Image: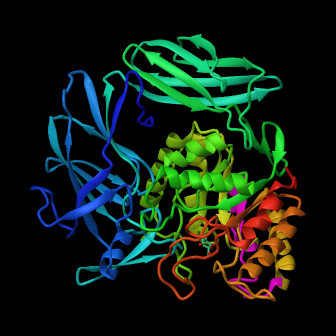
Amino acid sequence: MLYPQMNPKRWVVSLNGLWDFAFVDLEYKPVLPLVEKQLMGVPGSYNDVFTTQKAREYVGKVCYERLIYIPDIQEGLQYYIRFGAAAHKASVYLDGELVMTHLGGFLPFDVKVEHPKSSMRLTVLLDNRLDYQSLPMGELIENEGVFKQKIYFDFFNYSGLHRDVWLYKLPLKQIKEITIKTMIQSHEAHVFYDVTTLDVVESVEIKDPKGKIYKTQNRKKDILKIEEPILWDIHQGNLYTLIVKTQCDHYEQTFGIREIYVKDQQLYLNHKPIFLKGFGMHEDHEIIGKGTHPLLHIRDFELLKWIGANSIRTSHYPYDEQMYDLADQYGILIIDEIPAVGLNFWDSRTVFQEDRVNEQSLDIYKQTLKALVERDKNHPSVIMYSLANEANTYESGAVHYFEEAFKYARTLTDLPLMIVENVNAEINLVAQFADVIGLNRYHGWYTDFSDLSVIEKQLKDSFTSYLEKFHKPIVLTEFSADTIAGLHTLPAQTFSEEFQVEFIEAYINVANHTKGVIGTHIWNFADFQTKQGLTRFNGNKKGVFTRNREPKMVAHMLRIHFTKEIKS
Ligand code: GCB
């Protein structure tokens, strides 16, 4: 499923803009056009445009609808509608007829228009309910037909058509897939590519980052050798392009020449050990919620560049594809996370059992993982996949689930695999399957609140116990203290900008001097919205930047720290 592209043989039109919208009941079928309706912007979450709690925290189905037009329908072409992401379950109808259902709110899907007409009514019913089978996991409590959504993850359950929607056409014998892998051997790169198409390939060209056409031939699959390649590296987004021309189709796929692997408790990029410095992030903005916007993405990457970060984790779900394109260009490394979050009740109940997260959940997990790797495999920025965040990995049922998940992931990718953990090493039954362990730690915050003096010893103990039990490299994937921008206290008191500086410094000092720790990712890049809760003051305030992407005091400290050569 290649990203829609406009080129000499491909045509794409955006369906973004104002759509008709309504909250509908669970039995609603779009036999006729919506009558009771209002307008809604696409892409975006609908929640924060409303002024009532009921609408903002709505649980159930909504309807998005608009007319689409295909002028000059051509025989021998296929028409598709691409949804970048629709949270969480989508049923797509054309002229009132169901044509596709899709599960999962963070990955794209294509709807084939089997019988194109010059004008059609496109309807999307979206259901934002989460259950034991969905990713993220949630729990539904029903009381006389009214649903309450329980979630065990810490971000607002934004809903809607979050990413771009396109209509596009392709030739019958289209280029279906392109896979590119690269290896570096001293002064030479090996570029393996594989093009899936039924068409005759006329040419496959490689354009180098300076625009020079490098190699041309016409095989569907090959290994090309490039002398003295221009490597893709940290802060060096050197991109090559594979230009594939067939008799009827054309596609240009960017890629970077880089090699990544884990060896002897170290992470290597282009055969050099690297240390990750960056953030866990969220797709989260005022008003648009989890909606995508290219300018907002660019602001994030400009801030990453300003602060000197080299990497991010797409906590806790795959982000919009534009984020990966930008990471490719800015030379920022990505730990790409599957939306396996919330697999944790925070009480004594078991998650992994027959009537909760079960075999059916695992099947859905595998489908999601496959879709994720297929979507992101050609991005040089993606250096690792994270297969879960804070699941109950001490449960015996988790062993089967994750053993299967890791085994399956290894059939899809050669990249290192991570699991992000909050439990103690002694009870962890799953980290054994990973190549890299992510550790989320909040010593001095959720435990021993306000006591900075516990951090050094407790964090060292956390690292030591994981390193001694699993012998795998560790990324400190989360740590920070909630901080209200503009609150200053001396001495440093909790929630002040001074406290966040001292807190983060204390963690970094330990992590930077522990062998086997290969990176620090602060939680979070920016403040973000969550469900309402006693410890959430209009959201999570652990950001280094505000929700509006302005720096807190700690950002200036990190800017100095990140630009120092610590371990990389
Ligand atoms: C965590 C979670 C993250 C939360 C964070 C917090 O461990 O992984 O989703 O937002 O803690 O701030 O509580």
Outermost residue, left side: 32
- Residue 234 at x, y percent in the picture: 74, 43
Q: Is residue 113 above or below residue 275?
A: above
Q: Is residue 518 above or below residue 194?
A: below
Left or right: where 324 falls relative to 495: left
Asked whether residue 307 appears in the rendered view, the answer is yes
Q: Quadrant of the N terminus?
A: top left
Residue stretch rendered in magenta on the structure: 426-452
Q: Is residue 294 above or below residue 74?
A: below
Q: Is residue 309 above or below residue 491?
A: above
Q: Quadrant of residue 42?
A: bottom left
Left or right: where 150 falls relative to 169: right
Question: How many marks on residues?
Answer: 0
Left or right: where 268 falls relative to 132: right
Residue at 87% across, 78% down: 457
Left or right: where 422 falls relative to 133: right
- Residue 291 at x, y percent in the picture: 43, 58
Where on the image, by quarter, is ligand 1?
A: bottom right
- Residue 124 at x, y percent in the picture: 25, 54
- Residue 72 at x, y percent in the picture: 19, 26
Asked whether residue 356 appears in the rendered view, the answer is no
Q: Nearer the viewer, residue 164 or 520?
A: 164
Q: Nearer the viewer, residue 542 or 184?
A: 542
Q: Quadrant of residue 494?
A: bottom right
Residue 522 belongs to the span the image colors magenta: no
Residue at 51% across, 52% down: 295
Residue 428 belongs to the span the image colors magenta: yes
Q: Nearer the viewer, residue 415 or 243?
A: 243
Colour treatment of the image: rainbow
Residue at 16% across, 64% down: 28
